[in-house]
């Protein structure tokens, strides 16, 4: 912890660059982890939704607009790695905005269980938004989409909620440390 505090004593510009570097690298790492299927990290052929987990971790302490913007950026990155039709950006925008709204309204407390529950619910929301987009394209019947959506949403929600604290805890601690140091300097 003392090493982190010594890093924060750098000049404000270097501290800000370090903070943005950690934030950006963690977001990109979550997008890169998306296609990885490590042993024990998939359920019914579905893995955790790492970008969704990152958007939840980011948005929980930020405004609705900041959460939506983070969802847009990570959604576009995810679209760049997968098929852009349907877009993942829309579902992650909804997730970021809703999570930011929860924080603003103080409906939740920030602990591992709350983050896991939020990630669970937001994974279901994200997969449902994708399912609606599939329906609007008219490629498949609503029955087929609904059957697949149940399996995909539940698998994604379970795995994302289990892995959410792994992403949330270190990032939250870092952002909290940076914010507390900046507040003590003013």
Image (cartoon, rainbow, N blue to C red):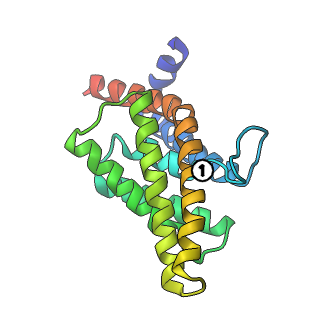
**95 left or right of 37 in image:** left
Expressed as whole percent of the image width and height from the top left, the position of residue 43 reads: 68, 47
Judged from the image, the secondary structure of the residue bearing numbered disc 1 is: helix
* Residue 169 locus on image (x, y percent): 49, 29
Q: Residue at x 24, y 39 (%)?
A: 107
Q: Residue furthest right?
A: 39
Q: Residue at x 34, y 40 (%)?
A: 61
Kindly identify which residue carries mark 1. Answer: 155
Q: Quadrant of residue 95?
A: bottom left
- Looking at the image, which is closer to me, 82 or 163? 163
Can you tell which quarter of the image residue 3 is in?
Answer: top right
In the rendered image, residue 121, in percent from the top left (x then y), is placed at 42, 49
User: Residue 140: in sight, yes or no?
Assistant: yes
Please report the residue visible at 23 percent of the width from the left and 45 percent of the height from the top.
104
Q: Residue furthest bottom?
A: 138
The reply to whether residue 11 is in sight is no
Residue 53 position within the rendered picture, expressed as x and y whole percent measured from the top left: 52, 45
Of 34 and 140, the residue lying toward us:
140
In the rendered image of this protein, does residue 26 appear above or below residue 9?
Answer: below
């Amino acid at each position: 912890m003392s090493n982190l505090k010594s890093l924060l004593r750098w000049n404000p510009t270097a501290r800000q660059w370090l903070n943005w570097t950690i934030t950006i690298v963690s977001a990109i790492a979550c997008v890169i982890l998306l296609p990885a299927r490590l042993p024990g990290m998939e359920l019914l052929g579905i893995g955790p939704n790492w970008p969704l987990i990152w958007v939840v971790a980011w948005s929980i302490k930020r405004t609705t607009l900041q959460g939506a913007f983070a969802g847009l950026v990570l959604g576009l990155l995810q679209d760049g790695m997968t098929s852009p039709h349907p877009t993942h950006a829309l579902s992650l925008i909804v997730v970021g905005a809703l999570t930011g709204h929860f924080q603003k309204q103080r409906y939740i407390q920030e602990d591992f269980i709350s983050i896991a529950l939020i990630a669970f619910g937001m994974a279901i929301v994200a997969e449902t938004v994708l399912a609606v987009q599939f329906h609007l394209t008219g490629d498949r019947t609503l029955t087929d989409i609904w059957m697949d959506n149940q399996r995909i949403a539940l698998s994604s929600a379970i795995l994302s909620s289990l892995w959410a604290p792994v992403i949330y805890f270190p990032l939250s601690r870092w952002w909290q440390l940076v914010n507390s140091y900046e507040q003590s300097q003013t």
